[in-house]
């Protein structure tokens, strides 16, 4: 994340393993615990309070230092008490259920999070919720099924409809809507309340918020004999078993997708032929790609489209077998050096017209001291393509399974053939300067669900 330094407002956050610094005694208001990356100015802005008032309420003299874990009193939030916790909204979290569980008014919840309407309750959004307010301990979650009375649902959870009516501000047991979520005292401490149709026992999106050029990992535990499908933005989701009853879908997010919110939809086909669906809007944030645009040598645009369509047709095939297990590895020897990053915006001029695109992979120069030109398979798989194309030159595409592909371009020599099984770390080619290049390097590219993603995310994270 890039932050602009504003003199006098941006402060230093000191990481510490010591006990949290307590709020100044004598102040009044809810407590916020300082998180990594916070500054006094951003905290004041988030809660719409004056920074001088924030400093005075906490006895802060030096605005240039905060400590991660430090407790700050937030003044001016009448009606809110307890500890203000920052939480990321995940798939299935419910706006209304979260308000009921925290036992604060909708007006105060909107004020804390600068919301105008519930429609701004996005998956991946960071929300402030009081974790030790009046609702502390409301961990018994009750959701009446279709045709089930509140009394029946309450008895199953060891509570009663009158308690539920009291804590959830219902006029009576008849005021409960099937499928809605209600809370009662007791039960083990739970995370944000999840409100899903009965076909989905649980749902989780890992590594929120999702980013441009990133890989979305969606883990669903469906009910027995339920077939899953769905879409993220405009891409179909393909689910595969994890072996414990849960299913996972991996889907890339286009690096040029405009920032904003997009639909994420789950569909369940039940054994009796009926279907259940659930949809929420999910927030897409800026990725880690470079933002400075580069001009490159002119290319005839007509030469690019056939290559793009050829590769898209190859990576559109979704193999149900997962060939890799664990991390992907570096495709070049050590020491390595990156000469160009994923997602860098580029443009070229052709016949007085401007054409924009982005760098679709990571470029590695020839920096290794031993076997400097060797190209290594980043993960196991089966070779799906070898050959020469205009832009990428001599290229190899490996099908790693589950809709994941790795591509190795600009090779001087290719050592593998289509259909050949490949192991991680196997030498598959030699770095070269074929195709549209200015010098020898390896262009390493990854496709997930038919979308190019940042390969560096796969080198530092384990999927799934």
Image: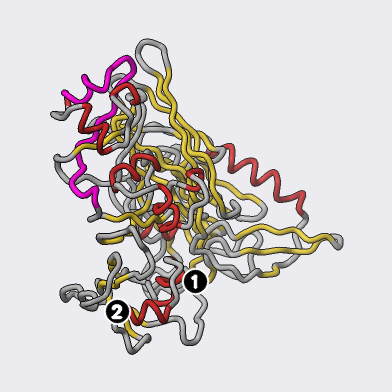
Q: Secondary structure at mark 1?
A: loop
Among the 4 quarters of the image, the one containing residue 38: bottom left
Q: Nearer the viewer, residue 3 or 246?
A: 3
Q: CA distance from mark 2 to mark 1?
A: 28 Å
Tell me which residue sits at (20%, 26%) in the image. 154
Badge 1 crowding class, 10 Å Cα cut-off, few under 14, some 14 to 19, many 20 or more, is few
- Residue corresponding to mark 1: 2
The numbered dot on residue 50 is none
Q: Which residues are magenta?
A: 134-155
Image position of 39 with respect to 116: above or below? below
Tell me which residue sits at (67%, 53%) in the image. 390
Q: Position of residue 128 (x, y in %)?
A: 36, 57
Q: Look at the image and tell me whether residue 129 can be seen.
A: yes
Q: Position of residue 34 (x, y in %)?
A: 30, 70
Q: Secondary structure at mark 2?
A: loop
Q: Position of residue 83 (x, y in %)?
A: 26, 61
Query: Is 391 covered by the magenta stretch?
Result: no
Q: Position of residue 70 (x, y in %)?
A: 25, 74
Image position of 428 with respect to 11: above or below? above
The numbered dot on residue 58 is 2
Viewer-nearest of labels 2 and 1?
2
Tell me which residue sits at (40%, 82%) in the image. 11
Q: Earlier in the sequence, mark 2 or mark 1?
A: 1
Image position of 115 with respect to 321: above or below? below
């Amino acid at each position: 994340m890039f932050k602009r330094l504003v003199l006098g407002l941006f402060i230093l956050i000191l990481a510490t393993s010591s006990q949290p610094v307590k709020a100044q005694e004598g102040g009044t208001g809810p407590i916020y615990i300082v998180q990594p990356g916070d500054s006094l100015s951003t905290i004041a802005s988030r809660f719409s309070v004056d920074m001088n008032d924030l400093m005075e309420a906490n006895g802060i003299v030096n605005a240039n230092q905060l400590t991660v874990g430090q407790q700050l009193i937030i003044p001016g939030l009448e009606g809110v008490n307890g500890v203000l916790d920052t939480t990321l909204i995940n798939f299935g979290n419910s706006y209304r259920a979260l308000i009921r569980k925290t036992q604060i008014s909708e007006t105060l919840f909107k004020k804390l999070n600068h919301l105008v309407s519930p429609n701004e309750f996005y998956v991946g959004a960071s929300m402030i919720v009081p974790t030790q307010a009046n609702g502390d301990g409301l961990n018994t979650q009750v959701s009446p099924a279709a045709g089930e009375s509140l009394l029946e649902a309450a008895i199953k959870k060891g509570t009663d409809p009158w308690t539920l009516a009291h804590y959830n501000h219902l006029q009576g047991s008849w005021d409960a809507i099937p499928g809605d979520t209600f809370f009662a005292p007791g039960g083990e401490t739970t995370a944000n309340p999840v409100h899903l149709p009965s076909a989905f026992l649980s749902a989780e999106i890992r590594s929120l918020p999702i980013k441009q050029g990133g890989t979305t990992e969606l883990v669903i535990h469906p009910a027995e004999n339920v077939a899953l499908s769905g879409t993220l933005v405009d891409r179909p989701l393909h689910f595969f078993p994890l072996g414990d009853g849960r299913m996972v879908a991996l889907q890339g997010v286009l690096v040029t997708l405009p920032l904003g919110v997009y639909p994420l939809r789950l569909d369940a086909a039940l054994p009796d032929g009926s279907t259940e669906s659930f949809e929420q809007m999910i927030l897409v944030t800026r990725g880690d790609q470079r933002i400075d645009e580069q001009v490159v040598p002119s290319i005839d645009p007509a030469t690019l489209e056939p290559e793009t369509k050829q590769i898209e047709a190859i990576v559109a095939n979704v193999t149900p077998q997962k060939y890799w297990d664990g991390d992907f590895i570096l495709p070049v020897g050590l020491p390595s050096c990156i000469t160009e990053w994923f997602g860098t915006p580029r443009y070229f001029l052709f016949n007085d017209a401007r054409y924009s695109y982005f760098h679709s992979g990571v470029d590695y120069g020839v920096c290794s001291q031993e076997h400097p030109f060797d190209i290594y398979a980043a993960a196991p798989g089966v070779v799906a393509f070898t050959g020469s194309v205009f832009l990428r030159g001599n290229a190899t595409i490996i099908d790693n399974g589950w809709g994941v592909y790795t591509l190795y371009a600009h090779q001087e020599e290719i050592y593998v053939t289509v259909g050949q099984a490949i192991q991680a770390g196997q030498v598959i080619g030699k770095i070269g300067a074929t195709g549209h290049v200015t010098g020898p390097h390896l262009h390493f590219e990854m496709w997930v669900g038919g979308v190019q993603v940042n390969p560096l995310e796969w080198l530092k994270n384990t999927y799934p």
